[in-house]
Image: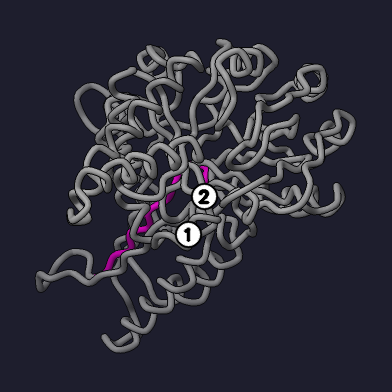
Amino acid sequence: MPLINMRDMIYHAYENSYAVGAFDLVSLDFLEAVIDSAERCRAPVILSIAEPHFAHFDFELMMPAVEAAAKRASIPVAIQLDHASDLNTAIKAIGLGCNGVMFDASNLSLHENISATKEIVDMAHNCGIPVIGEQGYVAGIEGEGAKQHPGESILTSPAEACAYVERTGIDFLAVSIGTVQGRMKSKAKLDFTRLKQLNQAVNIPLVIHGGSGLNEDQFRRLITHGVAKINYFTGLSDIAAQTMREKVKTVAAGSFTDLKQGVKEAIGKEVERCLKVWGSAGRAAEVLAQCEPWTPIEHLITYNVEQLDEWDANIMMNEGRRILSEIPGVREVFAGEAIKEGAKYRFCWMVRFTHKSAVESYHAHPNHAIFSDKLLRPYARDKLSIDFKDGATTNAFFVGGSASVRLTRCSS
C-alpha cells in the first residue's frame, strides 16, 4: 500500500505548503538510507532513478530492489525516472515499475521541447503516470553535474512556461531560477521574483533541480512560491564520498565493506535533515489517507482452442507475448498451458498493468487489435476474461467480505 500515486503526493505538498524530496539512488546504500530516514521522519518520499546514472548500475536489476523497498515501507512512496531523454526509456521505466517520469528536453528550442514532451505526456497519461517537464535549462558548474549538463543555464521565462504547460499537458514544471546541477562553487543567487511570477502564471506544482548547496532560508522561500518537489543527489554523494575518505585514514588496509561502514548512516542523516527543513516530516499519515494507492491490475484470459495443434498454440503464445509486451503500461505478459489433463480451460494469458488507466489504453492500442483479431479470436473458444485489482493494497476492493471482480465474457 505505501506505493501511492505520485501526482496525488506532489499536489498534497503543493496545497499544504511543503516539499517532497526526490532523492537519486546509485546503490543499495542510498536506497536503504532514504527509506530508513523517511520512516524515522514519517515523511512521504520519492525514490528517484536518473537516466544519467545508468552508467553506474544496471537499471533492470536496480528497479526490483527499489520497488521491493517501496512496497514494504510504511510511509508513502513514489518511484520516479529522472531526466529521461526519450520515449523508449520512459516506456521501459514504466514497465519496470516507475510511477512518475521526469522528461528533460530543456536543451532544445521551445518548439522542439513542446513536441518531445507532448509525446511523453500522451503515452504516460495513458498509463496513469504523471509527467514532470522542464522549461529553461539548469546547467552544471563543476564535477559530475557539469559533465551531464554542460553549457550555461537559461532561466525559465514565465511566458514560455505558460505555453509549454498548456501545449504539453504536463503535471509539474521543473524551473530554472539560479540553481545548478551538481556542486556549487558559492552561494546560489536565486531569482525569487521570477519564481513568484512562474507560480502565478502556470498554477501547477513547481520542481527544483539542483537542490544541493541551498540553505534553509532559500528552501523555505522556494516552498512559499510553489515548489512542491526538490531533487537532491550531490549533497548525498559528497557526504558518502567524504565518509569513505575519512574511513581510509583509519582503516587504510581495510576491505571494501570496511571502507563503506558508516556511509548509509551519513547519507541517512542528511536525508533526515532535508525532510525536516522541507516540511515533509510528519506528513505520512495524512498523505496515506488522502492519496490514491498505486494499485496494479491483472488481466486474466482463460480459453480453449480450436483448429490448432500444440505446436501452433505455442507459436501463438510466443508471438502474443512479444506483441503485447510492446504496449506501454504492460509490465508483464504470462502465457501458459494447464498442467492438469482435462482441465476446464487449457490455456491462459495473464497481463499485468502498471495502473487501471493502462487497461483502457491497452484495449485501444493497435498491438492489441493484432493480438486479438489475428492470434486469439480466430481460434479461441469458451473464453473468460477477468480484471483483478490487488487486494493487498487496499481493502476498498472487498464488499461484504468477498472479493469484487469485473468479469467480461468473450472479450480479450
Rendered image coloring scheme: one colour
Whether pointer 1 and pointer 2 mark residues with C-beta atoms closer than 8 Å, the reply is yes
Residue 261 % position (x, y): 22, 42
Please check the rendered image and state whether residue 172 is part of the magenta-colored stretch, yes or no.
no
In this rendering, the count of numbered labels is: 2
7 with respect to 305 (left or right): right
Question: For the view shown, which residue lies furthest in the right direction?
Answer: 159
Residue 182 % position (x, y): 58, 42
Please check the rendered image and state whether residue 357 is part of the magenta-colored stretch, yes or no.
yes
Secondary structure, mark 2, is strand
Amino acid at the residue labelled 2: Ala
Binning the other alpha carbons within 10 Å of mark 1 as few (below 14), some (14 to 19) or many (20 upward) gives: few
Secondary structure, mark 1, is helix
Residue placed under numbered mark 1 in the picture:
54
Which stretch appears magenta? Answer: 347-358
CA–CA distance in space, label 1 to label 2: 7 Å
Residue pictured at 22% horizontal, 72% vertical: 337
Binning the other alpha carbons within 10 Å of mark 2 as few (below 14), some (14 to 19) or many (20 upward) gives: many
Front-most of 212 and 281?
212
Work out whether 229 lies above or below 89.
above
Which image quadrant is residue 179 in?
top right
Residue 50 % position (x, y): 51, 50
Which image quadrant is residue 290 in?
top left
Front-most of 198 and 374?
198
Work out whether 341 lies above or below 109.
below
Amino acid at the residue labelled 1: Phe
Residue 226 % position (x, y): 67, 18
Residue pictured at 31% horizontal, 30% vertical: 1
Residue pictured at 40% horizontal, 71% vertical: 321
Residue placed under numbered mark 2 in the picture:
50
